[in-house]
Image (cartoon, rainbow, N blue to C red):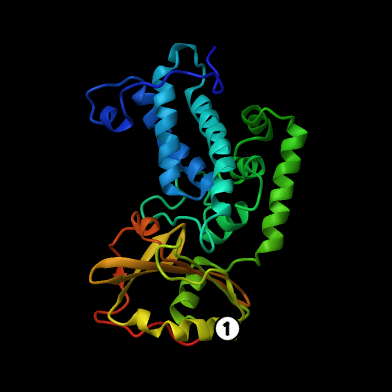
Amino acid sequence: MATASNPVPQAHLSLRDAETGEHDDGLSAFAGVRPRLFGIAYRMLGSAAEAEDVVQDVWLRWQSTNRKAVENPPAYLATTTTRLCINVAQSAHTRRETYIGTWLPEPVDTSSDPTVGAERGEALKLAVLMLLEKLSPTERAAYVLREAFDYSYDQIADILQMQEANVRQLVSRAHKHIADGRRAPVSSGEQRRLLEAFIAEDVVSTSDGGGIVRAARVPVVGRERVAKFIATAAHFWQGVTLAWVETNGQAAVLVSRDGVPVALTTIDASEQGIDQIVWILRPSKLAGISKSGQRLSQGCVQGPAAV
């Protein structure tokens, strides 16, 4: 019987070629679970580009697998995806240690798929992905599979090749880590209201320019410091337009200049107000965000309200 850990040669047919309909080569079984595979990989890696690479790798392996020997293709493909993601996450951790400034997850457009292939929208918001990044890849996998995809503990144990009791401990530790690192969030409607009002108290502003564009290299902490930081960047807001978009299951604002996205900002909020303002400035992380959205204004704007 084929297993997800067995090495297989790579095939020559890309997933894109198969999707043209000229070939099947296992596409019918793969296509039905592709959104789930991407959802697992994205939550594990915090990068849509890396998640797509993993899904493509899984597809190549699936083509070369003796599919008649696979009793449960969805389980096989999910297992392969998870194990590949653990390997990628281990190498990504080393790369991100040398990243210029603060590394933030790459946002994804969730207007058409609010849960990104999962049963629940867990482990999707940027603030949670940032906390997951601090977990080990195995802890991250256990939490994502359990909380977002509703896998049973014994299923996760099979995927991670661990005892069920150990899987329960991993999920429990991940829960505690996230609970300790984040206040209870407000509703989506209140989150959008606070983002629009841009009021802040006891707030942290975190920016990701990736060394490509100018951004704060460390989180800016505290209401007064955040206000001063935004005020010093007043030139940034000259000649830009703002539009509402939905990313990672919550409201965000896409900032464009001359029709080109230059930043995306969102917030994490609790009953105390805005806890964190997240700015995504690196161009490659803005590439996948839809340019469509509800305009906040029909003309140029001067920037956010004072915090």
For label 1, the crowd category at 10 Å Cα-Cα, with few meaning under 14, some 14 to 19 and many 20 or more, is some
**Measured along the vertical axis of the image, is residue 192 above or below residue 201?**
above
**Measured along the vertical axis of the image, is residue 301 above or below residue 179?**
below
Residue 107 pos. (x, y %): 44, 57
Quadrant, the N terminus: top right
**Measured along the vertical axis of the image, is residue 92 above or below residue 201?**
above
Q: Is residue 59 visible?
A: yes
**Measured along the vertical axis of the image, is residue 122 above or below residue 217?**
above
Query: Foreground: 186 or 252?
Result: 252
Residue 298 pos. (x, y %): 24, 79
Residue 257 pos. (x, y %): 27, 72
Query: Quadrant of the rendered structure where residue 287 is?
Result: bottom left
Q: Which residue is mark 1?
A: 225
Query: Foreground: 252 or 4?
Result: 4
> Element type at marker 1?
helix
At x 45% / y 63%, what residue is drawn? 211
- Is 301 on the left or on the right of 61, as rendered? left
Query: Foreground: 80 or 269?
Result: 80
Amino acid type for the residue under numbered disc 1: Arg
At x 46% / y 61%, what residue is drawn? 210
At x 37% / y 59%, what residue is drawn? 286
Residue 115 pos. (x, y %): 47, 50
Q: Is residue 199 visible?
A: no
